[in-house]
Image (tube, helix red, strand yellow):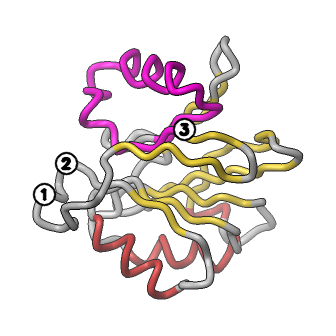
């Protein structure tokens, strides 16, 4: 199962659409900034299951029912999804990682900083910030799940979309 993770699109539709077409994900996730970009992407690809949280720039863009933190199992992997501003990730990820561990998650997904990173920490928790799909040429995250575990977790850039990912 392939999961495409996007964040901080800021109306950068072109890269998002290229990611979906090239990677052919089974699930899409948008981590905010701009919430309506995620909705538009889901309208373009309604057959792909879609999860979304709002970001700090989304106050006037989201329904009142939108959850700022989403705990969701996908392919038996439990994800903690948030934009990151509520956990002050620009000052460090300690609070965010602690919240994900308390929630007994296997992976934490966040954005907000526009800096892509992907790693597994010493406790086994996968941590991904896909960067910004709307700025700097675009970046996204790709997670592959098999047998209830994350087998691949990586950052995708424009140049990765033309080859076999």
Q: Residue 139, relative to residue 43: is it above or below? A: above
User: How many numbered circles does the render carry?
Assistant: 3
Q: How packed is label 1: few (under 14 Cα within 10 Å), some, or many (20 or more)?
A: few
Q: Is residue 60 found inside the magenta-colored segment of the image?
A: no
Q: Residue 19, relative to residue 149: is it above or below? A: below
Q: Which residues are magenta?
A: 80-109
Mark 3 and mark 2: Cα distance apart in space: 18 Å
Identify the residue at the far front of this view.
Answer: 65
Q: Which residue is mark 2?
A: 56
Labelled pair 2, 1 in contact (Cβ < 8 Å):
yes
Q: Which residue is mark 3?
A: 128
Identify the residue at the far right of this view.
Answer: 147
Which tag, 3 or 1, sits closer to the chain's start? Answer: 1
Q: Which mark is residue 101?
A: none
Q: Residue 2, relative to residue 11: is it above or below? A: above
Quadrant of the image occupied by residue 8:
bottom left
Q: How packed is label 3: few (under 14 Cα within 10 Å), some, or many (20 or more)?
A: many
Q: Which residue is depicted at the point 63% across and 40% down?
A: 78
- Using residue 94 as the reference point, say whether residue 25 is left or right of it: right
Q: In the rendered view of the protein, which quadrant contains the C terminus?
A: bottom right
Q: Is residue 89 found inside the magenta-colored segment of the image?
A: yes
Residue 12 on image: x %, y % = 35, 71
Q: Which residue is depicted at the point 60% across and 60% down?
A: 4
């Amino acid at each position: 199962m392939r999961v495409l993770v996007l964040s901080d699109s800021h109306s950068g539709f072109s890269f998002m659409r290229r990611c979906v077409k090239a990677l052919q994900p089974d699930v899409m996730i948008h981590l905010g900034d701009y919430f309506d970009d995620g909705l538009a992407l889901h309208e373009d690809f309604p057959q792909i299951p879609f999860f979304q949280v709002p970001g700090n720039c989304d106050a006037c863009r989201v329904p009142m029912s939108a959850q700022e933190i989403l705990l969701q199992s996908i392919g038996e992997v439990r994800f903690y999804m948030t934009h990151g501003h509520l956990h002050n990730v620009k000052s460090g990820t300690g609070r965010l990682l602690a919240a994900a561990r308390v929630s007994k998650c296997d992976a934490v997904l966040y954005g907000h900083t526009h800096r892509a990173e992907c790693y597994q920490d010493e406790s086994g928790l996968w941590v991904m910030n896909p960067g910004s799909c709307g700025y700097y040429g675009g970046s996204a995250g790709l997670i592959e799940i098999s047998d209830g575990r994350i087998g691949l977790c990586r950052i995708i850039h424009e140049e990765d979309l033309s080859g076999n990912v």
